Image (tube, rainbow, N blue to C red):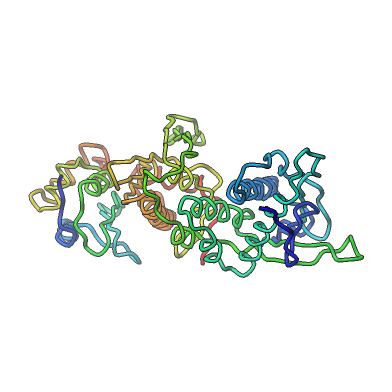
Amino acid sequence: MASLQGKKTTQNLLKKGFTKAEGDHHFFEFWHDGVLITKTRTSHSNQDINDHLIKAMSNQCRVDKSFFQEFAKCTKSKKDYIEVLIANGTIKSSSN
Amino acid sequence: MAAKSNKENIVNLQMEIVFSVDGEEEKDNTLSWEILKKIGDNTQKLIDTLLKFSLEENKISPELTRLVFTGFFKGSALPAWKLPNLPNLLFPVQDEVNKLNNDFNFIIKSLDKGNFQAIADHYNEPSVKNEIIEVVYDFSNSAGTKPLTVLKRVANSPDKFRQIAKVRKMDLKHKNLMQVKVPKDKATSKDKIEVLATLKVSGFGSNKSPKFSKKDLHLYTEKEATLALKFDLIETDKRIYTLKGEVPFILTNLEKEAYSIDSPLLDIYAYGTSVKEAEEDFFIQFDYTYQRLTNLPDNQLSEHLKNAKTLILLLVDNVKSK
């Protein structure tokens, strides 16, 4: 079963353009061209993120699990992420 | 074992139990059908559950303790119920009814003091404790956010009532703290299979209002799950959400000690090592989703988050800050 390091994932999400939500540091938001595109949350206390939480987070980030794992480990970039979001219709191509 | 009526009882179910609901809408002596029904249903559920666990033998038929509505009195919204008169039976059951009445009084007096722990401590068997806490939780929240009290007629002035107990609301946090985990092999054989429906919402993106329709039926065999997931209100540390529609979700038992509650339409994917933990995660995310999305204009939201905003606004009746 896959798992991700909680603290590392948090740091990497921030590097890839996610921002912490105001008032609750467990929630992260991805904004693009002034539009809130996706939101997700990490585990409490930087615990490791287990397979089920990875699935939940990838659903909220609108990507499949394998992409999310690579994204969280920094083998996929912000540009890759935006391309997937455009391809699956989450970001409207006109707003790109 | 024979039981006598306790002299310190404040309510006699065989005579009358009168409630008062205090709220802005009730000042003109009206009460919503929804609240009236909830008070009646939850009081009956409490009586049925107390009866189930109070007797060593099932000597008394539940039909004999089916509440009857006896009146709706002026002064505020004052609905009243009582137990039916006992018929002449071959084996008299007055002792059993006394025992039920004593147990009911114990619950009312504990709620009046806000001493929820006393109720939990009174029952040793985990499955019994959990079931009692569940029905007391429902009963104490029957009037939603409105104050609920128990009244009694003033002696020699039958048209006047005095307050004898406040029904203090048990919050979700207390309920979850007091309930204990029951190992599966010790679960009561009376657990039932219940059916919950998820809802399909259509009409987003058009000029028509979104419509709800039943989509899938899900069977859950764990009582804990079914009881915990009938959301009438959603309570977090910060706020209480009163709902006017059913929250669409799918509960999945992923594996041993892993549960998810997913609501793709609301963009909420909750997870926990128990149903309660998943429920708490769901509530936290529901709170964040509501607060965040409703505070952003539609043009700052992606399409699926705009749809989630529309749905969550349809579901929530009102929000009360703590």
Q: Nearer the viewer, residue B26 or B278?
A: B278
Is residue B104 shown left or right of residue B117?
right
Q: Nearer the viewer, residue A84 or B62?
A: B62
The relative height of residue B215 versus residue B6 in the rendered view (above or below) is: above
Q: Quadrant of residue B200?
A: top left
Q: Position of residue B215 (x, y in %)?
A: 44, 29
Is residue B149 shown left or right of residue B291?
right
Q: Can you name the residue that lies furthest to the bottom here?
A: B113
Q: Nearer the viewer, residue B307 or B275?
A: B275
Q: Residue at x 62, y 60 (%)?
A: B107
Q: Position of residue B242 (x, y in %)?
A: 55, 53
Q: Position of residue B296 (x, y in %)?
A: 40, 56
The relative height of residue B25 versus residue B37 in the rendered view (above or below) is: below
Q: Residue at x 51, y 46 (%)?
A: B315
Q: Quadrant of residue B180?
A: bottom left
Q: Position of residue B77 (x, y in %)?
A: 76, 56
Q: Residue at x 76, y 44 (%)?
A: B92
Q: What number of labels is visible?
A: 0
Q: Can you name the residue that lies furthest to the right here?
A: B156
Is residue B274 shown left or right of residue B228?
left
Q: Nearer the viewer, residue B126 or B178?
A: B126
